[in-house]
Amino acid sequence: AQSVTQLDSHVSVSEGTPVLLRCNYSSSYSPSLFWYVQHPNKGLQLLLKYTSAATLVKGINGFEAEFKKSETSFHLTKPSAHMSDAAEYFCVVSEGNTGFQKLVFGTGTRLLVSP
Amino acid sequence: NAGVTQTPKFQVLKTGQSMTLQCAQDMNHNSMYWYRQDPGMGLRLIYYSASEGTTDKGEVPNGYNVSRLNKREFSLRLESAAPSQTSVYFCASSQGLAGETDTQYFGPGTRLTVL
């Protein structure tokens, strides 16, 4: 079975400093990986996804993630945090590469951004 | 396009009461899903419908039933609500087409409290 581990439950940064949210996954074959963001009292929005094409994936709002098979990691980064980035972030792995998929969610990382 | 819509946004029930959560999507997606989100646990799949006319159990189906009314609508029913079902419920939809990497799109959620 596939699984995903988000290594930090909370990350605090200052506005303008880099963001790193860490995610490790477990998969028996080549996975699809996603990062979703959830702002307070809102639904989930897709930030980016990896689907076995380029290992460096660019998403919305300046976020990107790098797929490292040797490390089974898919960490999310952003060069400069903005106050509006404060939210909860979920790393997600799928149990199928194509067509219908079941998603397995990490437990989330809450990003706090201070002025 | 409204995307994925859910009603109601908030609901308070007493133990033993029943209710139905409604979900609709206007993206002509084949697959639809119901998740629950509890603090510190990420999202867990309750039921899903890979295509119109089919439904299957997810990770935590006990105490719930679903109906895929048509291609657009997928409802979740609690027949006899219990306090353990206090949660935020998310509906999602995706293309679910073979040969393509799927992306799920989420509704805004229903916050349910069972007293």
Image: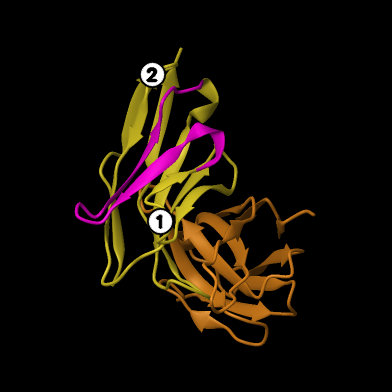
Chain colours: A yellow, B orange
- Residue A42 x/y as whole percent: 60, 43
Q: Is residue A24 left or right of residue B94?
A: left
Q: Residue at x 49, y 60 (%)?
A: B36
**Which image quadrant is residue A88 in?**
top left
- Of badges 1 and 2, the one in the foreground is 2
Crowding at dot 2, Cα within 10 Å, few <14 / some 14-19 / many 20+, comes out as few
Q: Secondary structure at mark 2?
A: loop
- The magenta span reads A59-82
Residue B56 vertical position relative to residue B36 in the rendered view, above or below? below
Q: CA distance from mark 1 to mark 2?
A: 25 Å
Chain of the residue under label 1 = A
Q: Residue furthest left?
A: A70
Identify the residue position indicated by label 1 in the image: A92
Q: Is residue A60 magenta?
A: yes
**Residue A17 image label:** 2
Residue A114 vertical position relative to residue A48 in the rendered view, above or below? above
Amino acid type assigned to the residue bearing label 2 in the image:
Thr
- Residue A52 x/y as whole percent: 40, 61
Is mark 1 in CB contact (under 8 Å) with mark 2? no
Amino acid type assigned to the residue bearing label 1 in the image:
Val
The answer to whether residue A29 is seen in the rendering is yes
Position of the N terminus of chain B, as image quadrant, is: bottom right
